Image (tube, helix red, strand yellow):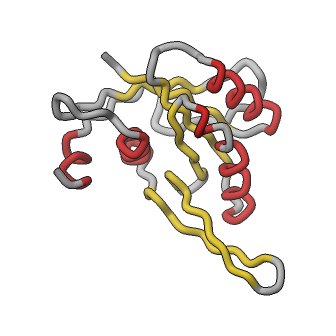
Amino acid sequence: MNLRAIAALLLIVLTLGGCALPLIQDDTTTEVVTISLSILPGRTITEGDYNNALCAQLGGRREVRHYYHYGGGERGYVVVDCETDFRVIEGGLDKRSSLDSVQQALFAAVLTGKEPTVAIYDTDGAEGGYEYRIHRAARKARVGFIRVMRAE
């Protein structure tokens, strides 16, 4: 099954007061999003599935590439998981591989002038050590934080 077919199966339900997600402004606010994903039996839900669902709900664009120049004329680029009119969102599973999410969101914000945001996809229903570290680092850096929980 290709990615378009998988994306067509996704049913997204967000539990927020509105469609706009407010950026975290203090240490007491966390955006919690619940997404219901319909995936074929026996198939594991991937980070890409979560990114597709969240970005579709927010009306954003997936995997937007932004170029930059550094050093002696070298050229590099970053790929933003989800970009809206006002935000660049780095999405990641609640795993060790997501520890660099805050840096990725901040650098994308430098390139675009948009608000940096991290979305962590909670796969086990509990705030584990990696989620805790990412959440606290995002707060300190004043980066938006969205905890995405899967509806059962």
Extreme residue in the bottom direction? 73
Please identify the quarter of the rendering in which residue 97 is found. top right
Viewport quadrant of the C terminus? top left
* 59 left or right of 23 in image: left
Which residue is depicted at the point 82% across and 32% down? 140
When the figure is inspected, residue 88 is found, relative to residue 36, above or below; the finding is: below
User: Is 107 situated above or below 30?
Assistant: below
Q: Is residue 100 above or below residue 108?
A: above
Q: Nearer the viewer, residue 61 or 135?
A: 135
Give x and y (percent) for residue 61.
44, 58
Residue 37 shown left or right of residue 134 in the figure:
left
Q: In which quarter of the view is residue 72 placed?
A: bottom right
In the image: residue 17, left or right of residue 99: left
Q: Nearer the viewer, residue 55 or 137?
A: 137
Q: Residue at x 78, y 37 (%)?
A: 142
* Left or right position of 137 against 151: right
Front residue (pair 148, 27): 148
